[in-house]
Amino acid sequence: MDDGQIEALPVDELEKLVRHHNDRYFRLNKPEISDYAFDKLTRRLKKLRPDSPALAELSEGALGNKVVHREPMLSLDKCYEPEELASWAEGIQGEFLVMPKIDGAACSVGYDAGGRLKIAATRGDGKAGEDITANVVRLGDVPKRLRVERAAEVRGEVYMRLSDFKKYAAEFANPRNLAAGAIKMKELPADSPYPVRFFAYDALGIDFATEQEKFAWLAEQGFSPAEWEVRPREQLQEAYEAHQRKRAGRDYEVDGVVYRANRTSERARLGNTGHHPRYAIAYKFQGDDATTTLREIEWSVSRTGAITPIGIIEPVSLSGAMVGRCSLHNAGMVGKLKVSPGAKVVVMRRGGVIPNLESVLEPGPAPAAIPERCPSCGKPTDLKGDFLFCSEPARCPAAIAGRFIHYLAVLEVEGMGEKLVRAALQAGLLADLPDLYALTPEQLQKLERMGETSSKKIVANIQAARKVPLAAFLRALGIDELGAHMSGVLARWGSLDAVLALSEEELAAQHGVGEQTANAVVRGLRENRPLIERLSKYVETTVASAADFSGSPLAGKGVVFTGKLEALDRRQAQKLVTELGGNTPSGVTRDLSILVVGGDELTGKPTGKRAKAEKYNADGAHIEIIGEPEFLARVEQARTALKK
């Protein structure tokens, strides 16, 4: 819905729409429009009727299994222009705490007077939420006990890292919705654990003079506070622009910048409206959107069997690029938004990723049909909540092709791309992953556009993948939760046999590995054991010893990256570390060896991971905090040492 259409709506229609979308977002956690579009509606209603009951009802809704919040969890007021931010800031005394607005699901964690974690709840309607204690206690960045002598409550955002979300992107619309569903375990496959995390941003029940004292306390207690800094009034717009520049380099979704009065006395002085606190505001990023026509809907089958709708649109320019495809989220959203071929739609591109369909302005001539059979294999489909799956992914050609493509990509086998994999499958040359190692140049030459030279090179590349690092082999299997970091953890056991003999308890006992993750990994290895045994006839897995990296300044070191790197992206940097004998844990812990800080974040007030590392160092840890140039220098030292 564009600005002109919103401005033409009468007040009663605006109120109806605000109530409807408020209920979809906060009570059902199934939004039908973007945050940006919802904000347009509420801002227009606020302008026409500031005292509208619909505005007072924002974020309210009925919930079962209520946990009443000690203080309401209110929404933040929002602004989109520098003038709006400046106008709000005029009423605030002193400096401002600034932090990114993480696009996750808000929740609260309550502790008793002895510091023990007692209850955790979703935000819900702001007054009461849903009990999620059983899932929150599994999160590694939520301490089970605080060093306090009174009851306290910590509030924060449950989110999923973008690097973790990549393996689910074919099945789910975005990290926020998946994290919100996972923490409640609703409408998601019960046997699929999803890695969610927690950023702390507030604490109740403890007295602080400033917000910066509060955030330091959160870090001391073992939380991972949201990145923060304190800025004077004249630097508020500069802070917004700095966060915009950092956005693409972050490993989590950010949809704006939050400003708070740093003095907690301002919190008491200004108080709240019925909807939002007066001492804080969110300056939202605006996505680049455009109106176009949906030509058709394609249903794509992933290697897991998830069937995802993709919109083919009349090409439009977004963020400087012409795009002709957009995400339609999931099967459930297609029905809710009344998506159909021929519809006039609004698409938005955020942070350079694939555009998303935001709303339908005019429906097409006929509603879209949700496939009752898999578009790849023709087997019946299963609709689980909003998500559509092939009922027999083990036999589905598209899912099988996806598993081959993933395996080859992880092992870096060049030349055997998606088209060639599909052609080889169709020709009967491949059926199971071990078949790759039996391919001959003569067989490949029978495929369309495959010459002698190319076929020989591809077969040679495949044969070169007979001896691979154990960590890479494990990751190539495509098991849930068995990504780059976890495969490195498993490789420490020294052999494939030792990994296969692991129990859930042994793996869960490793630092940074939760019970849920351990269960998923061990179960996945057990289920894939027949495949692993077949592959083992062709593949030799290797594990580097400490002696292999003698002289490398990164050998045995845990290295974490934060901020935007200039010379290489984070994935390349992590790969360098592992190739040179180090490892790349997921976050900053007391036993971390090196924190590499990118960009200009090495100077100035420490925030985020750097603040956490410096706090550990003050308590006796020995974490080196270095910039990207120093890291690259050590990479060269390691390469030189390993050549000798």
Image: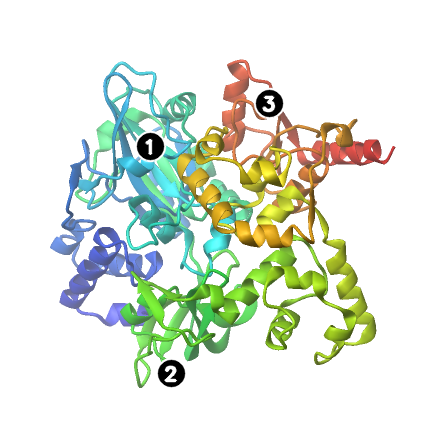
* Mark with earlier residue (2, 1): 1
Question: Of the numbered discs in the image, which one, if any, rests on residue 195?
Answer: none
Q: 502 or 25, which lies in front?
A: 502
Question: Which amino acid type is shown beneath numbered disc 1?
Answer: Val
Q: Give the SS element for disc 1.
A: loop
Q: Which residue is mark 1?
A: 137
In the rendering, at what x and y percent does residue 234 appear? 45, 37
Q: Residue under label 2, please give it.
A: 342
Mark 1 neighbour class, 10 Å CA radius: few under 14, some 14 to 19, many 20 or more:
some
Q: Secondary structure at mark 2?
A: loop
Distance (Cα) linking label 2 and label 3: 57 Å
Q: Is residue 316 above or below residue 579?
A: below
User: CB of mark 2 within 8 Å of CB of mark 1?
Assistant: no
- Tell me how far mark 1 sits from mark 3, CA to CA: 27 Å
> Between tags 2 and 1, which lies in front?
1
Q: Position of residue 212 (x, y in %)?
A: 40, 25
Q: Is residue 26 above or below residue 225?
A: below
Identify the residue at horizontal 64%, vertical 37% (top origin): 495
Mark carried by residue 623:
3
Q: Nearer the viewer, mark 1 or mark 3?
A: 1
Residue type, numbered disc 2: Gly
Q: Quadrant of residue 287?
A: bottom left
What quarter of the picture does the N terminus occupy?
A: bottom left
- Name the image quarter holding residue 38: bottom left
* Other residues around mark 3 within 10 Å, as few (<14) / some (14–19) / many (≥20): many
Asked whether, in this view, residue 373 is left or right of residue 565, the answer is left
Which residue occupies the foreground of this view, 141 or 423?
423
Q: Using the rendered view, name the quadrant where residue 209 is placed.
A: top left
Q: Earlier in the sequence, mark 1 or mark 3?
A: 1
Q: Quote the CA–CA distance across marks 2 and 1.
A: 47 Å
- As helix, strand or loop, the secondary structure at mark 3 comes to loop
Instruction: Say which of 311 and 183 sits in front.
Output: 183
